Image (tube, helix red, strand yellow):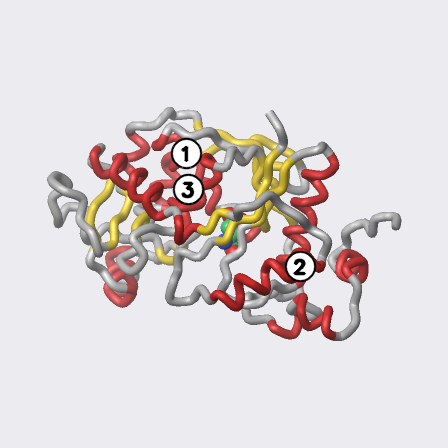
Amino acid sequence: MTFTTRFAPSPTGPLHLGHAFSAMLAYDLAMAVDGVFLLRIEDIDQSRARAEWEQQIYDDLHWLGLTWPEPVLRQSDNLAAYDAALDTLWARGLLYRCDCNRRDIEAAATAPQEGAPLIGPDGLVYPGTCRRKHPRIGPRPRGAALRLDMSAALDTTHKDMTFRDNADQPRIRIVQPQTAITHIGDVVLARRDMGTSYHLSVVVDDAAQHITDVVRGKDLSDATDIHVILQHLLGLPTPIYHHHRLIRDDTGKRLAKRDDARAISKYRGDGASPDDIRAMVGLPVKPA
Ligand code: GLU
């Protein structure tokens, strides 16, 4: 199988040094084995995505010396694929409608009888308020948030869910069903405002694009358990994951999306070269 990886930014702000590292590392890994590097635009959050940021992603990555096959997959053009995956899960009774807002969840999760609230990859672990409130039969609700019933879902999957995690030390990671229930919980798979979610879309697209190797930051390491569970539920292959180190600022803080001071375009405007960027993030500078 040809090594195929992707860089999947959201066009909601300028790419910074952390993105440059992730994209160039993925590109280098692909090129080293004659593989394929794809670019995917993760723009399902239409309230935050902007055409200008998308254009700047293309400009910055080209300037860094990266190329990719066209056409680029834009998630906003692919909503039918996410709908189909949601239909499959709905038909199996694994999704339920949730009407809670953030404040409801905070109030329920921090109620004294609940003990200490647990924080999962998506924030507070959902306390299950709506789990038995709405029928799971009939047409799938539209314009409503849908959560995965994690416990019911894991009852239907293979017990041994593992994946290869090539982080600092390559290892096989095991998705523990009990930990998924208690520490991840009923994640939202369709958001009210966008009809899908990051987790669902990324899993559907990685499979559709035949991604063999996902190269992304350690900040998404916990989310990978969710992705592997979804792959099992949807009958999709599990890629190899490379969770790379994060680029931090001088105070040790991870660079945030809004960190315009470290935007690639800023360095570029200040006269830096792509090799300077490689050196800054600790990637080998290629011989001319
Ligand atoms: N779109 C995600 C982000 O910008 C990346 C998702 C991924 O690589 O799986 O953080």
The numbered mark at residue 231 is 1
Q: Are marks 3 and 2 in contact (CB under 8 Å)?
A: no
Residue at point 62% right, 28% down?
2
Count neighbours of disc 2 (C-alpha within 10 A) and say few if under 14, some if 14 to 19, many if 20 or more.
Answer: many
Q: Amino acid at mark 2?
A: Ile
Count neighbours of disc 3 (C-alpha within 10 A) and say few if under 14, some if 14 to 19, many if 20 or more.
Answer: many
Q: Which residue is mark 3?
A: 226
Left/right of residue 251 with respect to residue 207 in the rendered view: right
Q: Which residue is mark 2?
A: 247
Height in image: 127 above or below 59? above
Left/right of residue 283 with respect to residue 239 in the rendered view: right
The part of the image, by quadrant, that contains residue 205 is: top left
Residue 192: percent from left, percent from top? 26, 58
| Chain-order first, disc 1 or disc 2 | 1
Height in image: 205 above or below 66? above
Is the C-beta of the residue carrying label 1 under 8 Å from the nearest atom of ligand 1? no
Count neighbours of disc 1 (C-alpha within 10 A) and say few if under 14, some if 14 to 19, many if 20 or more.
Answer: many
| Chain-order first, disc 3 or disc 2 | 3
Q: CA distance from mark 1 to mark 2?
A: 29 Å
Q: CA distance from mark 3 to mark 1?
A: 9 Å
Residue 84: percent from left, percent from top? 30, 39
Numbered disc 3: secondary structure: helix
Numbered disc 2: secondary structure: loop
Front-most of residues 153 and 9: 9
Q: Amino acid at mark 3?
A: Ile
Q: Nearer the viewer, mark 1 or mark 2?
A: 1
Height in image: 42 above or below 239? below
Height in image: 152 above or below 255? above
